[in-house]
Image (cartoon, helix red, strand yellow):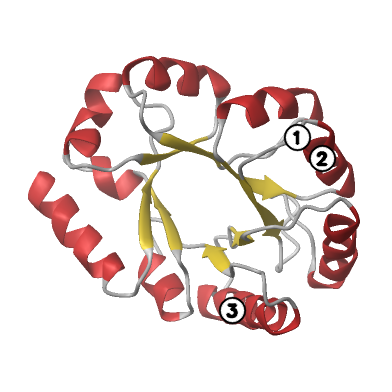
Amino acid sequence: MAINLEKLNDKILSYNAKLLPVVKNRSNNEIKFIYDSNFRDFGENRLDDFYEHSRVFKDVKYHFIAPIQSRKLKEICNSFTYVHTITRNKEIKLLESFDFKGEFFIQMNLDNDPNKSGIDENSLNNIIENCLESNLFPCGLMTIPNINSDPKKIYSKMEQLNNNLKKEYNFYKGELSMGMSGDFEVALDYGSTIVRIGTKLFDNV
């Protein structure tokens, strides 16, 4: 398993991107091989899992990658270094009020999937303006395409939106959190800088 993980990571690194192991719903014993392979960023979607994992893996930077409930955002801000799923102006204001010191992504929903969180292309400028007013700015954009969508089309549009922001704001870091176990290679071709992979890491565990 460690050899497969190393090969996967080498491929992702060749694109100047980073592998984010998604450890949701996994025990500490199951994810130990990832930690032992010197990964220090984990993707989580539940606070309960985070508390269990962080009790053992204390020097990891944790990424929150699930839809956000506003009442839990303060707890998320206090626990996570990265939040990938900001979608509302209200959440931007809350990040400001909580004095969040980490990094956050704006989640896009370009195929208007009613089962997924995120904003459409036309709403991006508005939320960026609110970020500027709050003296906060996202480090990048994130998306999860609908299973029936053409990932090339979605990821190409994400790359375009990201490049537009980089041109307009020279302080924008331009991260792209996109691509999972089934389509990460496509995402890399369209400029992904962080691929969130879970299932593929545990297929043979």
Residue 60 lies, with reference to residue 168, above or below; the image says: above
Of mark 3 and mark 2, the one earlier in the sequence is 2
The three-letter amino acid code for the residue at tag 2 is Glu
Per the image, the residue denoted by label 3 is 159
Per the image, the residue denoted by label 1 is 99
Of mark 3 and mark 1, the one earlier in the sequence is 1
Between circles 3 and 2, the one closer to the viewer is 2
The three-letter amino acid code for the residue at tag 1 is Asp
**Residue at coordinates 78% horizontally, 30% vertically from top-left?**
98
Between circles 3 and 1, the one closer to the viewer is 1
190 displayed left or right of 56: right
Give the image location of residue 18, x and y in percent: 37, 59
Instruction: Tell me the element at label 1.
Output: loop
84 displayed left or right of 21: right
The three-letter amino acid code for the residue at tag 3 is Glu
Residue 14 falls in which quadrant of the image? bottom left
